[in-house]
Amino acid sequence: MEKKQTIFFAPAKPAFIAAFVLFFYTVAGQKMQTFKNRCGSFYESMAHLYKIKQAELDFYQFKPGQRIASIGAQCCHIEAAYAATTDSVTFYLEDIDSSKFKKEQADFVWSYYAKLRGRPMTSSYRMILGDEKSTSLPENLFDKILIINSFHEFTFVVEMLADIRKKLKPGGILYIDEALPKRPGQLLGICNHPMQTNEETIALFATHGFEYVNGIDFNYRQKIPVRKIFAFSVK
């Protein structure tokens, strides 16, 4: 039986609804820090981070000693925020766009969150440059693989999911964090990629050898979920 949690937040302003499609991992009414010549947005305090991300952290359950891959990490700011909340986790950051996916950027975000939490980061990171058909990640290694607001951009879905299956160790979990459409066939923001419904997503991954484990819905005071994190295991 499907296990599901539903998270409610304060009503979103109209401007946020438009921005949500592109940056659905932020919450309406919450001010985020930005920095010149740096990509990504940043929480202003650890209290701010926990207020917005606690539901996700409870769902992911990062634990010391785990190896976590994030596919499509690009700016690395989301992963650094996660790293600030835990200890002794190794994050493998993967992307295909070397224009923003740079060690200088990753160093910056890790340093920012070290200062925010008031002590050195004990969770480390490694950077892996993949391509459209392969993550180039080590095989049979990962406790968890995260794909945050990136799966809809995959061009070669069959090849990528076959590759990802090999990267999870036995018992590992793949997490897909995506916006949900209000109607079938809806396109996602300015990128114009088609969005998939809850049922379409579960069916797609089943076709490629993944079993739906559970998920967490985000409503943001809407009548239906507008975002979901799916958790899949390898069949």
Image (cartoon, rainbow, N blue to C red):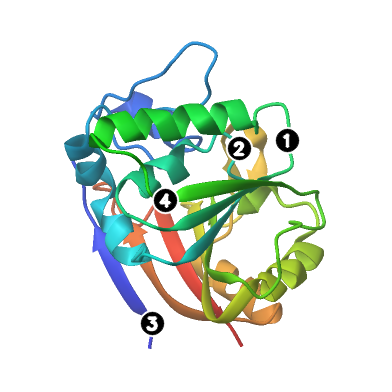
Q: Which mark is residue 74?
A: 2
Q: Is residue 9 above or below residue 33?
A: below
Measuring from the top left, give residue 222's x and y in whole percent.
Answer: 29, 49
Q: Which mark is residue 2?
A: 3
Q: Nearer the viewer, residue 123 or 135?
A: 123
Measuring from the top left, give residue 114's x and y in whole percent.
Answer: 33, 34
Secondary structure at numbered mark 4: loop
Numbered disc in front, either 1 or 3: 1
Q: Residue at x 55, y 74 (%)?
A: 202
Label 3: few (<14), some (14–19) or many (≥20) C-alpha neighbours in 10 Å: few
Label 2: few (<14), some (14–19) or many (≥20) C-alpha neighbours in 10 Å: many
Numbered disc in front, either 2 or 3: 2
Tags 3 and 4 in contact by the CB under 8 Å rule?
no
Q: Nearer the viewer, residue 147 or 178?
A: 147
Residue under pointer 1: 97
Q: Residue at x 65, y 31 (%)?
A: 102
Secondary structure at numbered mark 1: loop
Q: What's the distance in space between the residues labelled 2 and 1, CA to CA?
A: 7 Å
Tags 2 and 1 in contact by the CB under 8 Å rule?
yes
Residue under pointer 4: 123
- Whichever of callouts 2 and 1 sits on the residue coming sooner in the sequence is 2
Numbered disc in front, either 1 or 4: 4
Kindly identify the amino acid type of the residue bearing the numbered disc 1: Asp
Q: What's the distance in space between the residues labelled 3 and 4, CA to CA?
A: 32 Å
